[in-house]
Amino acid sequence: MQRASALIVAPLIVWFLLSLITLSTADYNSVINFFSKPLFLILTIILLITGFFHAKIGLSEIVEDYIQNEKIKNAVNLLGLLLSIIIPSITIILLLYKF
Amino acid sequence: MNDSKNPLSPHLQIYRWQISSLLSITHRITGILNLLGLIFISAWISSAGIGENLFEYFSVFLKSFIGKFILIGFTWSISYHLLSGIRHFFWDLGYGYEIKTVNISGVIVIISSLLLTVFLWLIGRGLI
């Protein structure tokens, strides 16, 4: 899953980063225009889901290697899981609501 | 202490620094930085979804010196993690385990991550 998600995230994050660099100097309307395109909207949503999913797996791997205390390990993993679900969910809901 | 029997993996303070270990830990550090970047991107997108007033704060920040510095740093972090990830794919496939190859591919990852950062900014800014 780590590898599979990486294959999806890699091209999407490069595309989004390029867009972000371009849009970082643009005005509000340009950004609204960007997300109004259905293809861009869908790609962004896929990026958010797979990106946070990939991050969650990676974070667990790091936690597994560096934290020995089971309670702290479980707490950090649970926090990571919740954040990797809540943050993209809120963002996607706002995106779908607005566009 | 309710510790597991698992051995703790890298004892960073004890090992002598080598390019292989340096690149490995950098892969993990950039992974965490990329997660922070992803959270920032989520906040940026959300602000655009909520309204222009909130979005303006992000706009001002991204145009500032610190904002640009962070965005360039994030571009490098992504570039490094992506290229280093490709290196991991080769290892998964069973290639590149010789010490010499590991060192060479490591240097290639470092140099090309810097080049990719410059390349992405030139394209992003419409300069090429």
Image: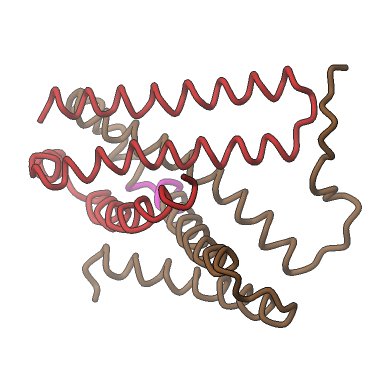
Chain identifier for the brown-coloured part of the image = B
The prevailing secondary structure element of the residues shown in magenta is helix
Please state which of residues A43 and B32 is positioned toward the viewer in this rendering: A43
Query: Which color scheme does this rendered protein use?
Result: by chain
Q: Residue furthest right?
A: B14
Quarter holding residue B87? bottom right
Q: Residue drawn 34% across and 31% down?
A: B43
In the rendered image, which quarter contains the N terminus of chain B?
Answer: top right
Compared with A95, B35 (above or below) is below
Please state which of residues B48 and B100 is positioned toward the viewer in this rendering: B100
In the rendered image, which quarter contains the C terminus of chain B?
Answer: bottom left
Please state which of residues A38 and A71 is positioned toward the viewer in this rendering: A71
Q: Residue drawn 44% across and 42% down?
A: B37
Residue A45 location (% of width, % of height): 25, 38
Q: Is residue B76 left or right of residue A13?
A: right
Residue A61 location (% of width, % of height): 63, 40
Chain identifier for the red-coloured part of the image = A
Q: Is residue A61 left or right of residue B79?
A: right
Residue B14 location (% of width, % of height): 91, 52
Q: Residue drawn 21% across and 32% down?
A: B48
**Magenta region: which residues?**
B63-69
